[in-house]
Amino acid sequence: MSSDDLSGSAPAECGERPVLFRPGGVTDAPDRAGLTEILAQALEEAIRCRTSCAFLVVAVDELPDLNDAYGFAAADEIIGAVGNRLRATMRGGDALGRFSTSKFGIVLKSCSPDDMAAAAERMQAAVRSTVLTTAAGPLVATVTVGGVVAPRHARRLGDVIARAQEALDVARSRGQGSFAAYRPNVGRDTRRRENARAADEIVAALNDRRIVLACEPVVAIASRRVVFKEALMRLRRHDGSLAAASEVIPVAERLGLTRLIDRRMLELATAALAADPELRLSLNVSRASVADADWRACLAGHLRASPQAQGRLTVEIAEPAAARHCDDVRGLVAAAKDSGCRVAIDRLGGGYGCLAHLGVLGVDIIKVDGTLVRNLLRSAQDRAVVRTLVELGRSFELATVATWVQDEGSAALLAEMGCECMQGALVGLASLQQPDLDAPVSRAAIA
């Protein structure tokens, strides 16, 4: 079948079944459930008759902007007009339905990859060919299209829908008004399988209580006494080995699991504080939890349940999150202070810069990024940056902690700069052991 045949009548092949939807008003189009039923029938027929069908997801471009600029009524008119123009390019045996608020789904029977590309091009041209008349005035619309041919590239209904949407994402990355067909990608499929395994492992570790707490000391540079300890995450594997946060958190961020880890770490940290009246901890909050009202509620709830832990927990927020989401950080700082916590900005100097906000965020501690500290003895530029950050902290009356300190030379240089505290290999790395109750604890540096 040539691509030109797509605008004509559908051939009656393999005992073609009646189509559930015939062209009519856009309000008559099937909803997603009805469209999915039509697609399932087309896929079943294509597999049985050894032919092919296609599924297109057509997104109306900039619909949120149109809503804002002209109102929902005008946007609805545009959706209706786009639906009518899409139908005008379709054959009698094909079907169009509402896939979501701003997307249409189109089922094309007896459709090869070349036919699908030609049909998508024709649909896009039909939409953008003339100005649309609406109550808000003449408007121009474009659509971005992603599609998949089945069963060639998907034999299950869920895969057909998912891969058409993946193709739409690719098309959007190319720009508005683009088209992309799904193409198999071995590397992508391998990554997905790895992600699925990683997600299973993280969720299983959470369910099995194999996310455990490790404590790394932060000491006063002058006295070398422990000021507080940073609570760090470790994942205990089934063989007993431990995975560090650096191995788990990037995967968890990619899979949207960091909120679950943050809540487990909060539970562990507050339990450790309740069990040891001399312990003071800091706890990292991921970017995902910075704006999470539920995490703030959990923080308040845990500290109310363990009043003996109040006043001994510091919440750490990484500088990139603070710089990008300043309003959310302000909310988190306020919630932490209301619960009796201190707040630290971590990785200062290694992100996108939130120096201008330090005075208004209301934080108590700044932690200088370790990538700067580790090169203090070798890099004049890093020394200048660290000195500036320490002086900045002093001007805001904030305690300053240097991270990743590995040698006495760096410690001496930090002391000369006026930095109060340090952590790193020089003074001890994270350990799963319970904090030493006999270790001296100084509250002078951070009080």
Image: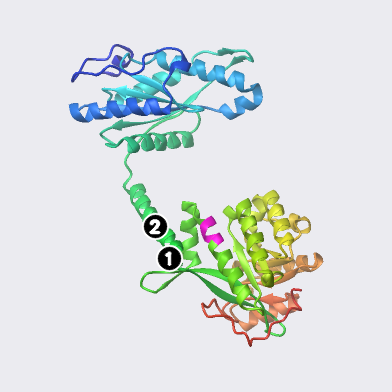
Where is residue 358? Give x, y as percent.
Answer: 75, 58
Q: Is residue 287 above or below residue 4?
A: below
**Principal secondary structure, stretch drawn in magenta:** helix
Q: Is residue 206 above or below residue 150?
A: below
In the displayed orientation, state which residue is furthest to the front: 305
Q: Nearer the viewer, residue 409 or 85?
A: 85
Residue 275: x and y in percent read 60, 76
In depth, the one of 164 and 380 nearer the eye is 164
Q: Is residue 229 above or below residue 119?
A: below
Query: Residue 262 lies in magenta, yes or no?
Result: yes
What's under tag 1, amino acid-wise? Asp
Q: Quadrant of residue 442?
A: bottom right
Farthest bottom residue? Answer: 438
Q: Are marks 1 and 2 in contact (CB under 8 Å)?
A: no
Split into 4 quadrants, where in the image is the C terminus? bottom right
Residue 393 picture quarter: bottom right
Q: Nearer the viewer, mark 1 or mark 2?
A: 1
Task: Give the tally of numbered discs.
Answer: 2
Q: Is residue 375 visible?
A: no
Q: Which residues are magenta?
A: 259-263
Q: Secondary structure at mark 2?
A: helix
Q: Position of residue 23 (x, y in %)?
A: 39, 13
Say which element carries label 1: loop
Q: Is residue 197 left or right of residue 266?
A: left
Q: Which mark is residue 149?
A: none
Residue, x 46% and y 57% (percent of image)? 251
What is the C-alpha distance between the residues marked 1 and 2?
A: 12 Å
* Disc 2 residue type (three-letter): Asp
Residue topped by disc 2: 200
Q: Can residue 185 be seen in this snapshot?
A: yes
What mark, if any, has residue 208 been given in the picture?
1
